[in-house]
Amino acid sequence: MFKMIALYKQPKDKEQFDAHYYGTHVPLTKKIPGLRKIKVTKITGTPMGTESEYYLLCEMYYDSQEAFQEAMKTKEAKASAKDVMSFAGDLVTFMVGEEVEHE
C-alpha cells in the first residue's frame, strides 16, 4: 500500500488543535476519493521518557501511488489541504511512501 504521512509538531493550544483536527479536519480528509484507511497516533513521548517535539502522526492509505496522485487532484483533497494549512501549516510535515512488508 502507498501512504501519505502527516507529522505534526506540538501545537501551542492542544485543546483547540484537537477540536479542529478531530471535529473538522479528519471528517474532511475521510471524504477524499480513493482513501482506504486513516490511522492517527498521538505521540506520548520518547523512549527516554522525555516529551517529544512531535504531537501527532497521521497515516493515510491508498491502493497505489497512482491512486494517491489521482486522489490529490480532487476537490475533496484540495479542501483537506486548504484546511490543514489554515490551522496547522506551520506544524505539519508531509511525506509519502510505499509500505514494505518483510518476514
Image: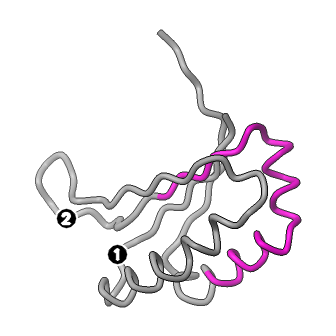
Residue beneath disc 1: 10
Which residue lies at the image location 61% right of the left edge and 89% below the top edge?
A: 86
Q: Amino acid at mark 2?
A: Glu
Left or right relative to 55: residue 87: right
Residue 94 at x, y percent in the picture: 61, 61
Q: CA distance from mark 2 to mark 1?
A: 10 Å
Q: Is residue 28 above or below residue 52?
A: below
Q: Mark 2 falls on what kind of element?
A: loop
Q: Which residues are magenta?
A: 58-83
- Mark 2–mark 1 CB contact (< 8 Å): yes
Left or right relative to 102: residue 18: left
Please tell me the numbered disc located at residue 51: 2
Q: Mark 1 falls on what kind of element?
A: loop
Q: Amino acid at mark 1?
A: Gln
Please tell me the numbered disc located at residue 94: none
Screen quadrant of the N terminus: top right
Which residue lies at the image location 78% right of the left edge and 50% below the top edge?
A: 68
